[in-house]
Amino acid sequence: MKLFSRFLAVLLALSLLPLACTALAEDPVTITIWGSDRENMPFRNGLMTIEILKEKLGINIEIISAPTENLAEKYGLLMASGDLPTIVQYKAKDLLLYKDAWQPLNDMINETDTPNLWKVYSDPEIRRKVSDADGNMRFIGQRTAITAGKLYFYRQDWLDKLGLETPKTVEDLYNVFVAIRDGDPNGNGEKDEIAFSVRKNGSNNRGNVIPFVNNWGIAETFFAEDGQVKFGATDPRMKDALEWLHRCYEEKLLDQEYLTRDKTAWYSEWTNNQVFMSYDWSAYIDNVSNLFKGQESDVHIVGAVPPEGPTGISETRDQLQPITVDEDWNAGIYVGASAEQKAAAMKLFDYLYSEEGMILLNFGVEGEHFNVIDGDYVYSDLIMNNPDGLSPQDALRTFGIQSMLTLLQDARYERAFVSDEVNRIRDIYEQEGHIGPAFPTLAFTNDEQSVINEKYTEIETYVNEMIDKFIMGVEPLDHFDVYVAQVESMGLQDVLKVYQDAYDRYMK
Ligand SMILES: [Ca+2]
């Protein structure tokens, strides 16, 4: 019966086809979207969410996947080719290196045509985060739902086993590290524990180690203090913070291979029962705990607040912004696209910012990926106990949910798939002042950008090298002043002037 009705439907469709073609003279408009395609966050044709969006909006969407290896180079080549897709998704600051390539969006975002975008971008606080130096909006960003991004976590069972108290300050933490190193908490008679180990992360690979410096009241690079823009890497407080990090490295408390250890190798250290503490996205508390699922083990991983620095600061600045501008999913619309394509792109973005679009991109399809139980959005077994053994987040992403598409995140999504422990520690970070001030992503004029290109690029390379040399002791910290002088001679003050101007403009 079912087969028969399908047969009928096909016949019917075929017989209607010529008529439909004449009646609807236009084909659906095709838009192309270039974006980074990560192994655990695919951005590809055929993803469930993309297929649903095509059907729902009557737009033909073609994804141009850019695998993340050498992504910056690929982006550079794309922009140099001059042959641009309708939409390019990338980091805001890199999009703004090609200001003329993007359609200004100020007029296109309005109450009538794009009410859902308007709801978010008419808020001046949000708007200034996405406005270029001349006041034009040139990209759509991703609206994030929560602010606690990365945090510290450790094995409470090891603290208990060795009778250690919860460390409060960086010096307490150092002492705990030493006790872990020497106390053989894994009980194998070998001194094989690594007190603090991370997976390499960020553009300079030390993204999960360097946040300790936040407890000294500084950021790794630019930050603002009393309205003044400062550079953390040459701040006197950086020297103190590096002394602590170097001590940890020198005494083998900090993983000796923090610059090269990838996720798989880092997971192995955990499953080998070697790691005490780490720092990563909050969901990793669950990811790491799940490595021990189904085994008989005492492993008990809990979130930890940042250790207090010398002046009592306990914070991390790895805070999620209300609009994520420094990740790969900000979307510019190519100025050379046709009017139909531009309109279709805006229709897509407006839908992604609607309640319905938000549910699709955060939760998927009701009954398949989630159910609404007593008003709460609850992920289905397909996501929470994935038959292929994927973590909830990875499972979602295989369907293109929470994938590389500019979207409106929902706090319910964030809370739905993490454990009570993650929610507990995230609330503590957010409510008890452990999230330090984030420095805004600034928009620069072309002239300002030239100063940055000319001077900061070189400074950044040099600083990147030196920070790791100081941590590892390749360069003694006695040379810190020489290093500062070197950075100054490379034009740091000119760069700071440019940042100050852009910052003042932003704050106005
Ligand atoms: Ca041991």
Image (tube, rainbow, N blue to C red):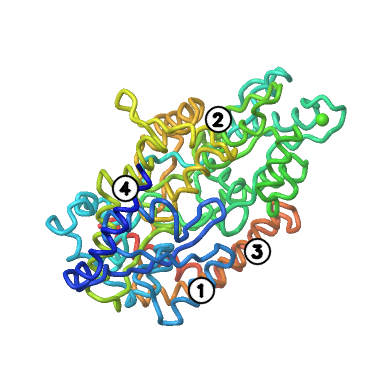
- Position of residue 20 measured from the top left corner of the image (x, y, whole percent): 21, 67
- Position of residue 384 measured from the top left corner of the image (x, y, whole percent): 50, 33
Q: Are marks 3 and 1 in contact (CB under 8 Å)?
A: no
Q: Residues within 10 Å of mark 2 (few under 14, many from 20)?
A: many
Is the N terminus in the top left, top right, bottom left or bottom right quadrant? top left
Q: Amino acid at mark 4?
A: Ser
The residue identified by callout 3 is: 482
Label of residue 303 in the image: 2
Left or right: residue 169 versus residue 62 is right
Query: Label 2, label 4: how many angstroms apart (C-alpha)?
Result: 56 Å
Residue positioned 85% across, 27% down in the render: 188
Q: Are marks 2 and 3 in contact (CB under 8 Å)?
A: no
- In primary-sequence order, the first of circles 3 and 1 is 1
Left or right: residue 289 versus residue 417 is right
The residue identified by callout 4 is: 5
Left or right: residue 463 versus residue 401 is right
Q: Nearer the viewer, residue 234 or 288?
A: 288
Foreground mark, 3 or 1, reads 1
- Position of residue 227 measured from the top left corner of the image (x, y, whole percent): 35, 53
- In primary-sequence order, the first of circles 1 and 4 is 4
- In primary-sequence order, the first of circles 4 and 3 is 4
Residue positioned 73% across, 55% down in the render: 476
Q: Amino acid at mark 3?
A: Val
Question: Disc 1 on helix, strand or loop?
Answer: helix
The residue identified by callout 1 is: 455
Query: Label 3, label 1: how many angstroms apart (C-alpha)?
Result: 18 Å
Residue at the right extreme, as displayed: 189
